[in-house]
Image (cartoon, grey):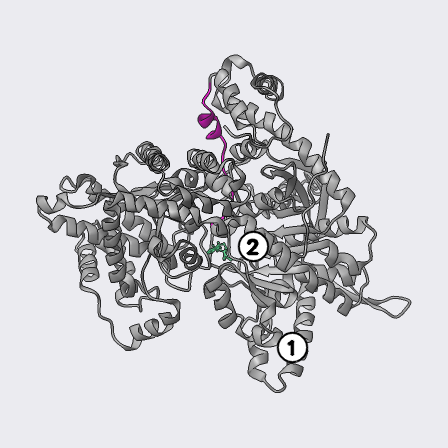
């Protein structure tokens, strides 16, 4: 085996065991005689935690001493998944630990699976933030993540009678990875009023007063880099009533219930992650969460800056704040408020600091996902911020007016305030105006934002304010951890694990395309990963699938734009064709397993209907004796990060089939390809750049292009609607009840045949089905298929989140790494 880096080493398995036993007996106060897997997990985690903490403290000390420019990544979501395996691999001592736990009578796999996912996110945006933390630490950037410490992460999904049921995810029972910092607290104000006064020198000041105060308490989690001692910090804020346990005046005056209620109201702020992705609902509590987190984080950042005693003009040279979507946009007026009301800077000086400090990443162009908050709500909750937002807007519009005199349409269209009833604050516009750079997350997406939602801002600021940073994924978790055998095979061929920190080295794998042993092992690994998934499917879902079948996987949040409905209609079509065939014809068919997984937002009725249809189709198809292994349909319950680590390495084909122009990037597409699976996809998001990298022959693209979407939608309304005969038949079978109660699915079918087919399912169905047939054909030639998959893996170097972070650092943050000092 190749020597991997290690930080604070356990010099031997004995030393590791000793630490585990010590923690079980003392920290947990348990006897070794009743040590179960949960206790063994706890002991192992605590032993590794000790190692992380030492490097974490050193990193923080070193950063305090050197005081370089730091990056602050503000994200309402960090979908971290499990920490133990990642910590063992990043620190480089998994092998020793593995031997140690087996001597204690456990299997490492079982111990790892004891840990609950840290599921503080919905999907792509949250997982991207987690990959970024891994890359930032690995590349030695002084960087902090800031988020909320939700008591409940994304709900757990259960499927009952084919329907999604949401179960609360209380994940904090035992979390060895977090450290409460009861000494790091911030008072956060809500409501109240603004009073203006003049000081002796005649200067006008605004004070925000009489508000309600809630306490923010910091909880920190260490983020170890791979192959480096750098261990960064993820700081999560928890809300607490400002007067501690109870309000004793109320308590003593007999208002016991009221005092408990106050406390609960305060704690509600950080209680739950909003489970919507891509739907903005304008709830007051969500706005409270956003402000609470922004204000606590900024107070922390400003406090740290002030310790250095540098002049305020240095702030943007010491601090880069990245806004992960518009959710943290209130940080912009908040910093302006701190600088003018708190520190006494004049407006212009403060505003120039603000603009230089922030960068804004956009993750969606879907209109229903763009955040708008009503003016009366902000007025009520954050009266001073509303004044500041109006002032930002007034000055911006004056400036625009000078550039484009008399262009009233322009002024109305770029105003932060939308003149509706009630008036609304457009958060994306505030984010653009308050940042020095705005980026999209894949080339097509970054082009689209410049021609659609931010078109007028390109006219105003010029094109240079807008840039692209194509998303990436961390190869540590998504190759080394999820697919250890493939990682080892690659290391053996390339002469070490350097590819884990320079993923472009994978290109050398193309030299081994003709190496028989390599090919054989590559193929065996894929098969073993499919066996592992098949085993999991059997355990979790009770469905037997043959690992020799083609595994076709679509796992992601359930959404109409992601078009799981297109996939399931395709599955029904396949089923109907199989039923039509003679036994002779069936023998020629490529067996396939269609695997779905993903959560629907609890209020998203159409997405839930698609889950129900998939489960109904699954029940019918899997029970059909004629069909047997030729087609199996699986809906995997409760898709999450740790399940993705089993699912992703096991695909032959994965589906990324959004309506062109709707999926900003996608990141699971990258994960599947990196693990030797091919893609069926539309020309959307990062699929386009994946195609550029792997070559058109190595990806299965289909469907209409983004540039044609508008015309096609128009045609549905004005040109009449003619349905492809194959899709018509699918709908007929759904309607005649072949997959259960037809009434349940009428709205889904009608959204296509009667209500304009907004997501162009009918337009893309035929080419989708044809492309799936091509896949069957291609898969029959296993040698060619293998060549394609190896070639794809070799060409995935571009999609490392390390590349992505380097681009942010150079183009947006202007920051340098701070490597740990050499020790002897
Ligand atoms: C306000 C409700 C809400 C919540 C979350 C609106 C929008 C979001 C996110 C922006 C949704 C999201 O996760 N977007 C995904 O971001 C990924 C990382 O950039 C992309 O790869 C996905 O294409 C994009 O859908």
* Whole-percent x, y for residue 486 in the image: 42, 36
Per the image, the residue denoted by label 1 is 397
The answer to if 121 sits in the magenta stretch is yes
Q: Secondary structure at mark 1?
A: helix
Magenta includes 266?
no
- Please tell me whether residue 248 is drawn above or below residue 354 in the rendered image: above
In the picture, measured across the screen, residue 517 lies left or right of residue 248, that is left
The image quarter in which residue 372 lies: bottom right
Which of 362 and 477 lies nearest the eye of the viewer? 477
Q: Quadrant of residue 595?
A: top left
Name the residue at 76% across, 43% down. Answer: 64
Which region shows up in magenta?
Answer: 106-123
Disc 2 CB within 8 Å of nearest ligand 1 atom: yes
Q: Which residue is mark 2?
A: 286
Residue drawn 82% across and 67% down? 197
Which numbered disc, 2 or 1, marks the residue closer to the eye?
Answer: 1
Q: Is residue 824 above or below residue 223?
A: above
Quadrant showing the C terminus: top right
**Residue found 55% across the figure and 41% down from its top:** 151
Q: Residue at x 67, y 75 (%)?
A: 394
Residue 324 place in picture, x, y as percent = 57, 55
The disc, 2 or 1, on the residue closer to the chain's N-terminal end is 2
């Amino acid at each position: 085996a190749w020597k991997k880096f290690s930080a604070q080493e356990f010099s031997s398995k004995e030393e590791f065991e000793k630490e585990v036993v010590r923690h079980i007996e003392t920290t947990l106060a348990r006897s070794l005689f009743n040590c179960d897997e949960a206790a063994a997990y706890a002991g192992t985690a605590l032993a590794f935690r000790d190692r992380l903490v030492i490097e974490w403290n050193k990193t923080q000390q070193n950063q305090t001493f050197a005081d370089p420019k730091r990056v602050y990544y503000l994200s309402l979501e960090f979908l971290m998944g499990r920490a133990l395996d990642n910590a063992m691999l990043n620190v480089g001592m998994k092998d020793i630990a593995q031997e140690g736990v087996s001597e204690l009578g456990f299997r490492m796999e079982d111990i790892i699976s004891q840990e609950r996912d840290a599921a503080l996110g919905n999907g792509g945006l949250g997982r991207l933030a987690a990959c970024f933390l891994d890359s930032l630490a690995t590349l030695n950037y002084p960087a902090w993540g800031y988020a909320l410490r939700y008591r409940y992460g994304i709900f757990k999904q259960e499927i009952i009678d084919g329907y999604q049921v949401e179960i609360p995810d209380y994940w904090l029972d035992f979390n060895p990875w977090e450290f409460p910092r009861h000494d790091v607290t911030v008072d956060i104000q809500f409501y109240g009023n603004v009073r203006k006064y003049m000081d002796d020198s005649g200067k006008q000041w605004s004070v925000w007063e009489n508000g309600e105060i809630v306490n923010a308490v910091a909880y920190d989690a260490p983020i170890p880099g791979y192959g480096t001692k750098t261990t960064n910090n993820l700081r999560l804020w928890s809300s607490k009533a400002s007067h501690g346990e109870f309000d004793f005046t109320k308590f003593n005056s007999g208002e016991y219930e009221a005092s408990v209620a106050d406390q609960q109201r305060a704690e509600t702020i950080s209680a739950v992650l909003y489970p919507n992705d891509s739907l903005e609902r304008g709830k007051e509590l969500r706005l409270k969460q956003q402000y609470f987190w922004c204000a606590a984080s900024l107070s922390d950042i400003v406090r740290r800056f002030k310790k250095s005693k540098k002049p305020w003009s240095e702030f943007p040279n010491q601090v880069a704040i990245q806004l992960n979507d518009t959710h943290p946009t209130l940080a912009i007026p908040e910093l302006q408020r701190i600088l003018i009301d708190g520190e006494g800077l004049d407006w212009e000086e403060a505003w120039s600091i603000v603009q230089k400090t922030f960068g804004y990443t956009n993750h969606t162009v879907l209109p229903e996902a763009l955040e708008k908050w009503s003016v009366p709500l902000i007025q009520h909750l954050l009266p001073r911020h509303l004044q500041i937002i109006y002032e930002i807007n007034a000055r911006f519009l004056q400036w625009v007016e000078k550039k484009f005199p008399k262009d009233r349409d322009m002024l109305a269209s770029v105003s932060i305030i939308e003149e509706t009833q009630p008036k609304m604050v457009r958060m994306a516009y505030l984010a653009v105006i308050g940042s020095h750079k705005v980026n999209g997350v894949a080339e097509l997406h970054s082009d689209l934002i410049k021609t659609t939602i931010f078109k007028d801002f390109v006219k105003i600021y010029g094109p240079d304010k807008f840039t692209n940073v194509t998303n990436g994924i961390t190869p540590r978790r998504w190759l080394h951890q999820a697919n250890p055998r493939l990682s080892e095979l690659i290391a053996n061929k390339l002469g070490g694990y350097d590819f884990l920190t320079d993923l472009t080295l994978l290109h050398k794998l193309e030299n081994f395309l003709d190496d028989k042993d390599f090919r054989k092992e590559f193929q065996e690994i894929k098969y073993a990963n499919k066996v592992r998934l098949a085993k999991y499917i059997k355990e979790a879902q009770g469905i037997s699938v043959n690992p020799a079948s083609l595994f076709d996987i679509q796992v992601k949040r359930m959404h109409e734009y992601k078009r799981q409905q297109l996939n399931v209609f395709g599955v029904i079509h396949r089923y109907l064709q199989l039923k039509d065939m003679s036994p002779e014809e069936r023998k020629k068919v490529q067996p396939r397993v269609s695997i779905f997984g993903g959560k629907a937002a609890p209020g998203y009725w159409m997405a839930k209907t698609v889950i129900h249809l998939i489960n109904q189709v699954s029940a019918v198809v899997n029970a059909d004796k004629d069909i047997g292994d030729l087609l199996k349909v699986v809906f995997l319950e409760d898709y999450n990060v740790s399940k993705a680590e089993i699912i992703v390495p096991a695909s032959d084909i994965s589906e990324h089939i959004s309506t062109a122009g709707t999926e900003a990037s996608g990141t699971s597409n990258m994960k599947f390809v990196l693990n030797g699976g091919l893609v069926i996809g539309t020309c959307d998001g990062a699929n386009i750049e994946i195609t550029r990298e792997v070559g058109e022959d190595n990806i299965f693209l289909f469907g209409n292009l983004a540039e044609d979407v508008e015309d096609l939608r128009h045609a549905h309304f004005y040109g009449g609607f003619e349905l492809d005969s194959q899709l018509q038949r699918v709908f007929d079978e759904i309607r005649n009840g072949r997959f259960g109660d037809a009434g349940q699915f009428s709205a889904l079918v009608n959204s296509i045949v009667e209500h304009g087919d907004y997501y162009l399912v009918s337009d893309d169905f035929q080419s989708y089905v044809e492309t799936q047939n091509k896949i069957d054909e291609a898969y029959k030639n296993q040698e060619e298929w293998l060549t394609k998959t190896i070639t794809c893996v070799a060409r995935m170097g571009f999609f490392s989140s390390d590349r992505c972070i380097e681009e942010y650092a150079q183009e947006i943050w202007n920051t340098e790494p701070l490597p740990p000092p050499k020790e002897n």
